[in-house]
Image: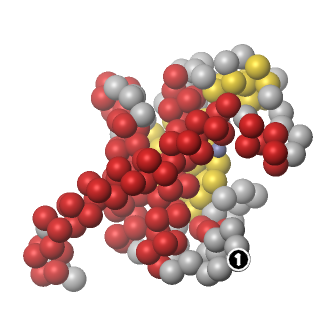
């Protein structure tokens, strides 16, 4: 798997966590190592119309996609749903959780559950085209992504904080 992260002002540790999250989520979502090896994920962090979006890359094979672009708008993640400003750790977790959400969509594209055709975005062959935010949350692919994002974050943090503890000494020496 090749992961490229384009971002400004995002610290090294969060970028490292994002790299690891890609591997963790793709494998947790049941994608085989053989397929995972051939994946190209390009993550763009910057202003975007939504908090996150996963797209099949322009030149990718639409019928067997392995190249993806993930957009994360971390500026939209500064505040929670109640307009409270998030602390650094909360913010970092929100970025990782949104990334996990988008990786569920990547899994859906790889499996062919979600596909990008001239007719638009299809779920199992059907274009759902949501009319409002309520419809959006009813979309089967959003239900899956929303349902899995927290578990993926939680599972990832167990591994990640374990790793940080294990390498505490090494991390300190190079800090
Ligand atoms: Zn989604």
Whether residue 76 can be seen here: yes
Give the image quarter of residue 79. Answer: bottom right
Q: Is residue 175 above or below residue 139?
A: below
Q: Quadrant of the N terminus?
A: top left
24 vs 138, nearest the viewer: 138
Q: Is residue 112 left or right of residue 32?
A: right
20 vs 135, nearest the viewer: 135
What sort of colour scheme is used for the picture? secondary structure
- The residue lying at 50 percent from left, 32 percent from top is 107
| The residue positioned farthest toward the right in the image shown | 131
22 vs 59, nearest the viewer: 22
Q: Is residue 156 above or below residue 73?
A: above
Q: Residues within 10 Å of mark 1 (few under 14, many from 20)?
A: few
Residue at image mark 1:
83
- The residue lying at 70 percent from left, 77 percent from top is 83
Q: Is residue 43 left or right of residue 131?
A: left
- The residue lying at 73 percent from left, 34 percent from top is 139
Could you tell me which secondary element the residue under label 1 belongs to? loop
- The residue lying at 72 percent from left, 56 percent from top is 50
Whether residue 19 can be seen here: no
Q: Is residue 169 left or right of residue 71?
A: left
How many numbered marks, from 0 up? 1
Q: What is the x, y in percent for residue 7?
A: 52, 67
* Figure quarter occupied by ligand 1: top right
Q: Quadrant of the C terminus?
A: bottom left
Q: Is residue 114 left or right of residue 100?
A: right
């Amino acid at each position: 798997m090749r992961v490229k992260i384009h971002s400004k002002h995002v610290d090294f540790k969060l970028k490292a966590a994002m790299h690891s999250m890609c591997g963790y989520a793709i494998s947790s979502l049941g994608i085989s190592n053989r397929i995972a090896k051939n994946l190209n994920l390009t993550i763009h962090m910057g202003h975007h119309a939504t908090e996150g979006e996963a797209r099949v890359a322009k030149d990718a094979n639409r019928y067997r996609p392995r190249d993806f672009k993930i957009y994360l708008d971390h500026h939209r993640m500064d505040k929670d749903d109640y307009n409270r400003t998030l602390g650094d750790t909360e913010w970092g977790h929100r970025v990782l959780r949104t990334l996990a959400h988008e990786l569920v969509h990547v899994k859906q594209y790889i499996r062919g559950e979600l596909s990008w055709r001239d007719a638009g975005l299809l779920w199992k062959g059907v274009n759902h085209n949501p009319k409002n935010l309520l419809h959006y949350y009813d979309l089967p692919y959003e239900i899956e992504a929303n349902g899995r994002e927290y578990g993926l974050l939680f599972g990832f943090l167990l591994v990640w904080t374990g790793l940080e503890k294990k390498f505490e000494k090494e991390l300190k020496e190079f800090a």
